[in-house]
Amino acid sequence: MTLKNDFSSIRQWDNENFIHPWERMAHIGKNQRTFTESSRGIYLTTETGKRLIDGSAGKWCVQIDYGP
């Protein structure tokens, strides 16, 4: 399966094949997750170009930096 930035197909495939630990049972298979297109410093850029601070990274790991 080739998924070259076709985020709709990636979301569908993800919903059909994975259960994420933070999901509620009622939402399984229905989520519209945000995908990261790029990252720099403490910022993530989504597939729609929105810039976010990766504030929740510490929940799963220690986030130092994404690079220069």
Image (tube, rainbow, N blue to C red):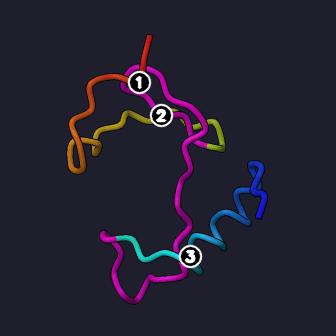
Task: Please tell me which residue is depicted at 52% across the width and 73% down the height of the picture.
Answer: 31
Along the horizontal axis of the image, is 41 left or right of 64? right
Which amino acid type is marked by label 2? Leu
Which amino acid type is marked by label 3? Asn
Task: Please tell me which residue is depicted at 31% across the width and 69% down the height of the picture.
Answer: 22
Please give the range of residues in magenta.
Answer: 21-46
Along the horizontal axis of the image, is 23 left or right of 35? left
- Seen as rendered, the residue at the extreme top is 68
Dot 3 corresponds to which residue?
15
User: Mark 1 to mark 2: distance in Å?
Assistant: 9 Å
Task: Please tell me which residue is depicted at 50% across the width and 29% down the height of the picture.
Answer: 39
Q: Position of residue 15 (x, y in %)?
A: 56, 76
* Classed neighbour count for the residue bearing mark 1: other residues with Cα under 10 Å, few (<14), some (14–19), many (≥20): few
| Label located before the other in sequence (1 or 3) | 3
* Whether label 3 touches label 2, CB < 8 Å: no
| Label located before the other in sequence (1 or 2) | 2
* Classed neighbour count for the residue bearing mark 3: other residues with Cα under 10 Å, few (<14), some (14–19), many (≥20): some
User: Mark 3 to mark 2: distance in Å?
Assistant: 22 Å
SS for dot 2? strand
Residue 42 falls inside the magenta stretch = yes
* Classed neighbour count for the residue bearing mark 2: other residues with Cα under 10 Å, few (<14), some (14–19), many (≥20): many
Residue 45 falls inside the magenta stretch = yes
SS for dot 1? loop
Which amino acid type is marked by label 1? Tyr
| Label located before the other in sequence (3 or 2) | 3
Q: Which mark is residue 44?
A: 2
> Which of the image's four quarters has the N terminus?
bottom right
Image quadrant where residue 20 sits: bottom left
SS for dot 3? helix
